[in-house]
Image (spheres, helix red, strand yellow):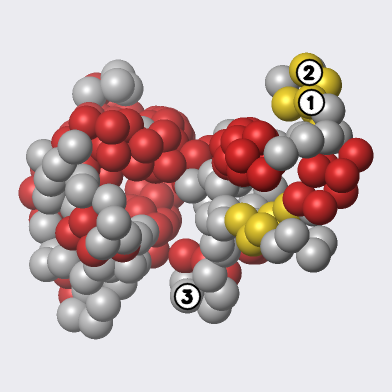
Amino acid sequence: QKRDGRVVPYEEDKIREAIHKANNEVEERYRASEGLIEEILEDVQQEGRQTQTVEHIQDMIEEHLVEHNKYTLAKKYIVYRYQRSLLRKSNTTDESILKLIRNENKELAEENSNKNTRLASTQRDYIAGEVSRDVTRRLLLPEHIAMAHDNGVLHFHDADYFIQPIFNCCLINIKDMLDNGTSINGKMIESPKSFQVACTVTTQIIAAVASNQYGGQSVNIKH
């Protein structure tokens, strides 16, 4: 079972390759023989008749190496495993972004029927969202929240905007702004004297609010 929850067939060659890479990093006297490698693979396969996680299989390999006094090799394998873990964490968005560019990300394509994922402008928006999700999950959320989201215990909304210090929906106090004036982009706008100017100011206010948040807006002259 992969780290993302996918269940895939057991691939012995990948495990053998990982051990060989660690083998090549140590002196010959510390290396595992082909016989020992085959023994490890056989034991992993025997236990792997039931679904096993990647981490459990890697733990088994380390235990076998230590049991056969291959401490130096076990250390190299642990370092290799750690480096692979860092690489995964640093490249978590590559595949999702490439799928988006190739228009193969069905989840995003169906997420919002108002957005055409073939358009360059839409793709740029979604790419920014993918980066935000990645940073949010790895760096901003407490680990237990991120794990709960990954395991489907809860759903953390709007992770695609979470890295920015902005808020969601807004009920605009348009009456106060029209009655007493307001400030947009640091410029004071006086209370409008005509209906036409009031409509123009209202649209400017809505545009300014939209530039500083990511959710919907409600406008009611009574508020």
x and y, in percent, of residue 144 in the image? 65, 63
Q: Nearer the viewer, residue 96 or 76?
A: 96
x and y, in percent, of residue 152 in the image? 47, 75
Where disc 3 sits, the SS reads loop
Question: Where the N terminus falls, by quadrant?
Answer: bottom left
Q: Is residue 18 visible?
A: no
Q: Residue at x 43, y 42 (%)?
A: 129
- How far apart marks 2 and 1 lie (CA) works out to 9 Å
Left or right: residue 68 versus residue 203 is left
Q: Closer to the camera: disc 2 or disc 1?
A: 1
- How far apart marks 1 and 3 lie (CA) works out to 48 Å
Vertical arrangement, residue 121 with respect to residue 67, above or below: above
Seen as rendered, the residue at the extreme front is 194
Where disc 2 sits, the SS reads loop
Mark nearer the N terminus (1 vs 3)? 3
- How far apart marks 2 and 3 lie (CA) works out to 44 Å
x and y, in percent, of residue 133 in the image? 48, 46
Where disc 1 sits, the SS reads strand
x and y, in percent, of residue 210 in the image? 58, 41
- Amino acid beneath label 3: Gly
Left or right: residue 217 versus residue 112 is right
Q: Which residue is mark 2?
A: 186
Q: Which residue is mark 1?
A: 189
Q: Closer to the camera: disc 2 or disc 3?
A: 2
Label 3 neighbour load within 10 Å: few <14, some 14-19, many 20+: few
Q: Which residue is mark 3?
A: 152
Label 2 neighbour load within 10 Å: few <14, some 14-19, many 20+: few
Q: Is residue 168 visible?
A: yes
- Amino acid beneath label 1: Ile
- Amino acid beneath label 2: Gly
